[in-house]
Amino acid sequence: MSESGAVGGRRPGRTLLVGCGSLGTQLGLRLVAEGNEVIALRRTTEGLPAEFAVITDDLSVPRPRELPGCDSVVITLPPGAGFYRASLTALAEALPERPSRFVFVSSTRVLEGSAGETPLTEETGPQPTSPRARELRDGELVATELLGACIVRPAGIYGPGRESLIRKVREQAPVDYSRRTNRVHQDDLVGFLHMMLTAESPPALVHAVDQAPSRLGDVVTFIAERLGVEPPPHMVPEVGGGTVLDGSRMHGLVGALEFPSFREGYERMLSGSPHPQTR
């Protein structure tokens, strides 16, 4: 429970999921199970659950369009050059009225220029240095200005279907053991996005990270031990870098995470345990 009393009983209602990849789909299934209507909007809608209403559209293509009224909107679109500004402007123009809750899923990548050992909080000013990070930051600003969005910044998302680090260990790809990393399991992120939709007064900005910032070497060594293989070789030269993120705002809102560190998350992924679609 947060000090602001953010956790409450708001009903998400009709929810538009813009992008709706694996993250949006998992969130949508949870919403449907609770009796909410879900509409998924993306460029191609094949493979989406039958429980979703679907809209096939590319918001970055300028054209007149009308979207149905919604109580909630969640954006999980990947960045692209100029993509957010065009797409979010089109979205704002196509909705008959501003939804009462809008959540924009960004990334902690916008803090990449603040590398160091000092934990970064939501008060830390963004320092995007790469084109992808600058586009994400632009998306945050546009979403806030046009739609009054709450911003959620996940760190490295992992879980079923997001297994790139496991593949690196299997393939013995060189790894920068000294790099500082942060992550969040997709199940915990879905649970947090659900909270952002149901809270009476959610925070305007939150880092979505687990409770254990870790050197990359610690993570790959753990994975290698579970796989019964040698740890991957060190990258030469190692450049280190990376950030340490403070997730106390998120943790204060949701309480205990199902996967508080990479150990619990990768243990589940490597154990072959059944994985629920919703939480």
Image (cartoon, helix red, strand yellow):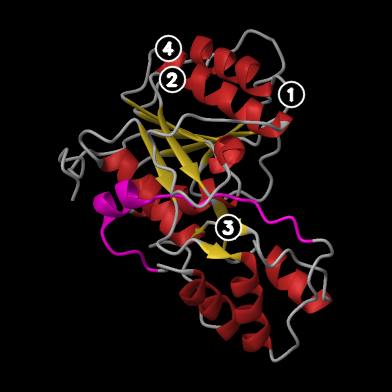
Tag nearer the camera, 4 or 1: 1
Picture residue at 42% right of the left edge, 12% below the top: 96
What element does badge 2 sit on?
Answer: helix
Picture residue at 38% right of the left edge, 19% below the top: 148
Amino acid beneath label 3: Thr
Q: Specify which label sits upstream in the sequence, 4 or 3.
A: 4
Describe residue 205's horizontal placement relative to residue 66 as left or right.
Answer: left
Reading the image, the residue beneath label 4 is 96
Q: Which mark is residue 144?
A: 2
**From this viewpoint, is residue 249 visible?**
yes
Residue 140, position in %: x, y? Answer: 51, 25
What element does badge 1 sit on?
Answer: loop
Tag nearer the camera, 4 or 2: 2
- Using the image as rendered, state which of residue 99 and residue 155 is in the foreground: 155
Query: Mark 2 to mark 3: distance in Å?
Result: 27 Å
Q: Specify which label sits upstream in the sequence, 2 or 1.
A: 1
Query: Mark 2 to mark 1: distance in Å?
Result: 19 Å
Picture residue at 57% right of the left edge, 35% below the top: 110
Picture residue at 18% right of the left edge, 51% below the top: 1
